[in-house]
Amino acid sequence: LYLLGRHHWNQFTEEGIRRSIEHYQEAIATDSRYAPAYVGLADAYLSLGLGHGHGAADPLEVMPRAKEAVGTALKLDPNSAEALAVLGMITFTFDFGYAEAERLLLRAIEQNPNSALAHDRYAILLTTVGRHEEAIEANGRARALDPLQLILAVDRGNILRHAGRVGDALTVAMEVQRLAPQAPISHRVTGQAYLATGQYADAILSFRRALELSDGDPWLSAGLGHALARSGDEAAAREILVDLFALAEHRYVNPVEIGYLHLGLGEDEGALTWFERAVDGHAGWVNHLQYRPGIERLRSHPRFQELLRRMNLVD
């Protein structure tokens, strides 16, 4: 049951993650002292809270469940590298606690130096706080341990983009696409790389393909809308914005994505308002805002600087 849970989690789709939750819960019902099942459950809730699987879950609802599950895992096995790595990820993505997250992730690596996910999550922490070269090295160690793990390649593409190495990021993104051509996340990372290089027509194609494969992920819709706006097709971008507002009336939509579409349309104050809501709600990957393609013109804005302070990213 645990292995079935990991299998479905690795698909990074809403259906896959929710099925993984069912398998982990069955595993816990079978053996309530089996720590890995609680770790898997925590990881699944964490993934929903970060926006994987269409971002259909409000982080304020699912992250506390992730904390509860990983807390149980650590009571059963205080030295579980996997549990420490999940708790570290929750600590810096949701709680904005970077020093404590680093302590937890380094302890996870100490407990199991062969944990690719622990090394990769440490890499994501490092890039979040601007230590990009260290992040590239940490992700390299993760990929050496598990060369075919899709998410590790995706993360490398994002880390390189964060470091300003957009050409290298695009090369890795194309590698990801070859690795898993039917995975929406493969085309998403390519679309983001094309956005960073200003190749809007290619970005539009990538996001459209990702949307076809994902059956309508708001994260991807916002990326497509941003690319359309930057390419000059404001009418199509506004149609997507209207659709996102309609979707938000009956399910969670990450405010970062609505803000990002406003940014593409050149509506900076509107974008900042949505980004502020995202910080209020500890939205998935809100502390990666400063690395979004096109965000450069907001960096010095007082409201944006205040957002970074609230997320403990600047003094």
Image: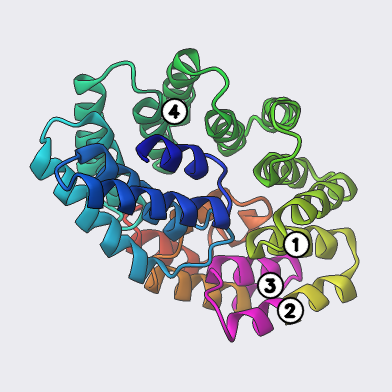
Residue drawn at x 53%, y 78% as measured from the top left: 273
Q: Earlier in the sequence, mark 3 or mark 2?
A: 2
Horizontal arrangement in the rendering, residue 250 relative to residue 69 (left or right): right
Q: Magenta residues?
A: 243-269
Q: Position of residue 303 (x, y in %)?
A: 47, 71
Per the image, the residue denoted by label 3 is: 262
- What separation in Å lies between label 2 and label 1 (alpha carbons)? 14 Å
Label 4 CA crowd tier, 10 Å (few <14, some 14–19, many 20+): many
264 is within the stretch colored magenta: yes
Q: Position of residue 271 (x, y in %)?
A: 61, 73
- What separation in Å lies between label 3 and label 2 (alpha carbons)? 13 Å
Per the image, the residue denoted by label 4 is: 135
Secondary structure of the residue carrying tag 1 is: helix
Per the image, the residue denoted by label 1 is: 226
> Is residue 4 shown to the viewer in this render?
yes
Horizontal arrangement in the rendering, residue 258 relative to residue 65 (left or right): right
173 is within the stretch colored magenta: no
